[in-house]
Amino acid sequence: MGEQSSGKFVWIGDEDSPFPGSVDIENCNRGNCSAILVSGKQDPDRVLEIVRNCCGSDIPWLVYGSEENMERWLDAGAAGFLPAGASGETIQATLHGISRLLENASTRNPLSGLPGNVTIASRLKSDVLEEHGLAAYFDISGFKPFNDYYGFSRGDAVLRSLAAILTENLSGYFVGHVGGDDFIAIGEGGDFEESVKRVTRIFNGRAGGFYSGKDHAAGGIEALDRSGEFRFYPVMDLTVSVVDGTGCSSVEQLARRAGLEKKRLKGEFLPDTVARFLSGGDEIPEYQDFREWLRNSEPDTLQMKALIESAGIIGDTKMTTCLIEILNREKDYKIRKSAARALGNVAGQDSAKALQTALKDGNVHVRTAATMALPFVLGGEAGAFLRDAVDDKSTWVRRAALRGLGISGWQGAAVILRCELERRDEGRFWLNRRQELTAALEGAAFLGDPHLADAVVDILRENPGIKKEIVWKTLLTLGGQICVNEMLNALECGDYFDIIRQLDRFDPHGLPSESINKLESALTGLKLRRGTDRIEILRFLGRIPGSASGRISKWLLDNIEKTDDPHEFEALLETMKSREVTPRGYDLARIVDRTAGNELKLTRKGIVSMLRWASTGKYALSKSYLEKLLRHDSREIRNAAARTVISLARKQTEPREEE
């Protein structure tokens, strides 16, 4: 429940106020007035002047008792009319309602259209802090480097997509936009929590579609970090923290509990833009500026394409109008193609009409580029156009449309993708059909609809010439019981290579415990030679919710003795931590002995995990080894060792429990 407005309600009229608690206009100012009721006997122009001078032009006001001169009242700014004789309670309720509507509209985030911080704070207070609701805080890991790399407009397309996913999958619950890549949802019960998990799965399944082809294939981007050094950032990942209001007295405490920082980081300004280059200043360039550059510089086609596509790469929104004109007017299809690509990267919705027109361009390359661009510009609204593009005469356009349907998240996408996944050759050129089927698989993976899993399984079994790696990638992304059954069949037959390589895509949440147990048993029973494969299985086991069974606990503990690879050992310790498996009494001492004898070299994270166990006081750790770690080169290890020393010292001073 939201709070009612705390401002005053004003009456303007010579007769007595028709509702209790009203104040005169003389006692109102811009800071404490919420809504105004005006006598219909007043002059509209005079009322407008009074309201502007005393309360400002953004305060809503209604006319009471007369609808004469309706056009004059509406022209003056009246929000509506109340009939004479309305009760005081009706009047007050109406004024409360119109003031709340205005407040909600004024606080909505302009990008997503979702309620902003004012409304969010009110709902958190009423529904979570004062009631028994849950708050789910959403944050996109890797969004800032993506935003810096591709430009603000492409980043805005990601945020709009997330807002649409939240709105669609959390229907009936409150959804708000804190700012930047931070969103929030409020609700309660198991259905709410399952919906929150579904949002995460859907977004993570589509996130790769926002990257260019090479970056998507590489699994991320190389971008500058805060220190100015280049580093690799994997594909964006949506994380969520669900908290209740127990023990919290403020919205700020609730936010801290969720572990989310409320920061709005600004991207770095690029030293130059295409728009500034063409216009010679900060003005928006026109098509004639582009043509003038062609006349003066006489660039070749490659130079023209490079400049046009650079506008898209840096998200140069001032180039939108010029790019649209280039797409509409240039004769060289290569230039039109580059303009369509750039508009897709800029992702401004004002380019939608030009791209829709380009879907009918006589050149296949232009149509393909426009088809690829539309999902970023229109999101789900691109679905109807992509549906038609699936029947284009060119295989290139059809492929782009199938991928785009998944990225768009359009409600009708699953039906079309299923048709393509189940379509037989039907006389099409075999190579084209194979590539279109691959595109449909990629589209299904982006869409993330588990109901498509059975169609993907059929492809896996029929083996129509598609790489098994691609099929398994899609199937594991979709997840669900059908996927589990197929994984178990393949593992039983020893066909596990492609499964393990794509295991990080599979989401084990929400599956029956029986299915999880079978999958754990099959994976841990494999005899694997490569350490990288064993690490992938350990990481998967660590993502399974809940504590480990006795059998899995024993398997993990036994591997402490067998593992000598430092990275595999690190993954083993992290899995034990996440699955709540504690080491046996002699394990830490044995690890120290192995490291001292150079049988095992621990990674930094491995040493920190070991120190975390030692700090409990339940396990022996030699004082000489601990002293060595206090002088380690790594600050992280020195800090962990220091915390362990303090913890052990504190435990020595605590009174022992009587046996």
Image (cartoon, rainbow, N blue to C red):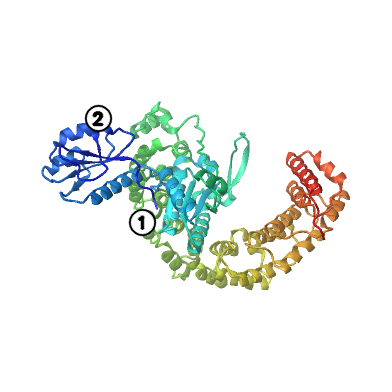
Q: Residue 22 appears at what percent x and percent y?
A: 25, 41
Q: Amino acid at mark 2?
A: Asn
Task: Confirm whether residue 49 shows in the render.
Answer: yes
> Which one is earlier in the sequence, the residue at label 2 or at label 1?
2
User: Compared to 133, does 318 lie above or below?
Assistant: above
**Is residue 106 shown left or right of residue 499?**
left
User: Is disc 1 surrounded by few (<14), some (14 to 19) or many (20+) residues within 10 Å?
Assistant: some
Q: Residue furthest left?
A: 68
**Is residue 549 shown left or right of residue 357?**
right
User: Compared to 139, does 427 lie above or below?
Assistant: below
Viewer-nearest of labels 2 and 1? 2
User: Compared to 605, does 518 lie above or below?
Assistant: below
Residue 464, picture quadrant: bottom right
Q: Residue 450 appears at what percent x and percent y?
A: 50, 66
Nearest the eye: 262 or 305: 262
**Is residue 486 shown left or right of residue 118?**
right
Q: Residue 150 appears at what percent x and percent y?
A: 50, 42
Q: Secondary structure at mark 2?
A: helix
Q: Secondary structure at mark 1?
A: helix
User: Is disc 2 surrounded by few (<14), some (14 to 19) or many (20+) residues within 10 Å?
Assistant: few
Find disc 2 in the rendering and name its residue. 53
Task: Confirm whether residue 372 shows in the render.
Answer: no
Q: CA distance from mark 2 to mark 1?
A: 51 Å
Residue 385 - label = 1
